[in-house]
Image (cartoon, helix red, strand yellow):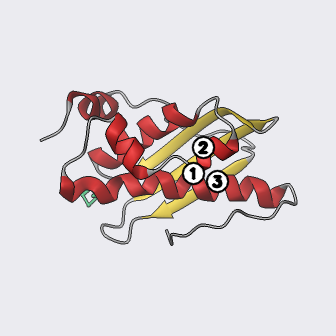
Amino acid sequence: MYSDKVMDHFMNPRNVGEIENADGIGEVGNPKCGDIMRIYLDVEDNIIKDVKFKTFGCGAAIASSSMATELIKGKTLEEAWRLTNKAVAEALGGLPAIKMHCSVLAEGAIHKAINDYRIKHGLEPWKDDKNY
Ligand code: FES
Ligand code: FES
């Protein structure tokens, strides 16, 4: 049911933890299942220098969090904002259809963390067309 990459990121998730005094923190809950994901960002010169996550959720959510943090590390905030849950799922070699909603957590938490950073720095939050 799960690709090798999903299993790898589930068994050995990258970037688990918290960042003290993070520049941006985003948390979303999944209304479908009650799972929760929190993302911490360290930002320097508009670049994501470090990122950590904590996810209370299913294996697909943990694998998605892990992959998403790998995909945005070292990227600009604009690039990180454009990361879609579809791209996360593709990078994982696909997710079963009933598990696609689990990858939405990563996209939502990243968006919230970026906007948390923007608000803390007196910038307009970016508009989200989705409600997480
Ligand atoms: Fe979240 Fe299954 S519903 S672990
Ligand atoms: Fe809840 Fe996957 S079942 S995020």
Identify the residue at horizontal 70%, vertical 58% (top origin): 115
Task: Give residue 25's mark.
Answer: none
The quadrant of the rendering that contains the N terminus is top left
Identify the residue at horizontal 32%, vertical 60% (top origin): 101
Q: Secondary structure at mark 2?
A: helix
Tell me whether circle 3 and circle 1 mark residues in contact (CB < 8 Å): yes
- Whole-Å distance between the Cαs marked 2 and 3? 10 Å
Check disc 2 and give the amino acid type: Ala
Query: Which circle's residue, 2 or 3, is located before the other in the chain?
Result: 2
Query: Which circle's residue, 2 or 1, is located before the other in the chain?
Result: 2
Instruction: Residue under label 2, please give it.
Output: 80
Q: Residues within 10 Å of mark 2 (few under 14, many from 20)?
A: many
Q: Residues within 10 Å of mark 3 (few under 14, many from 20)?
A: many
Identify the residue at horizontal 20%, vertical 33% (top origin): 3
Tell me whether circle 2 and circle 1 mark residues in contact (CB < 8 Å): yes
The percent position of residue 94, horizontal first and vertical second, equals 25, 41
Identify the residue at horizontal 57%, vertical 36% (top origin): 72
Q: Secondary structure at mark 3?
A: helix
Based on the displayed image, in which of its 4 quarters is residue 67 positioned?
Answer: top left
Instruction: Residue under label 1, please give it.
Output: 110
Task: Give residue 113's mark.
Answer: 3
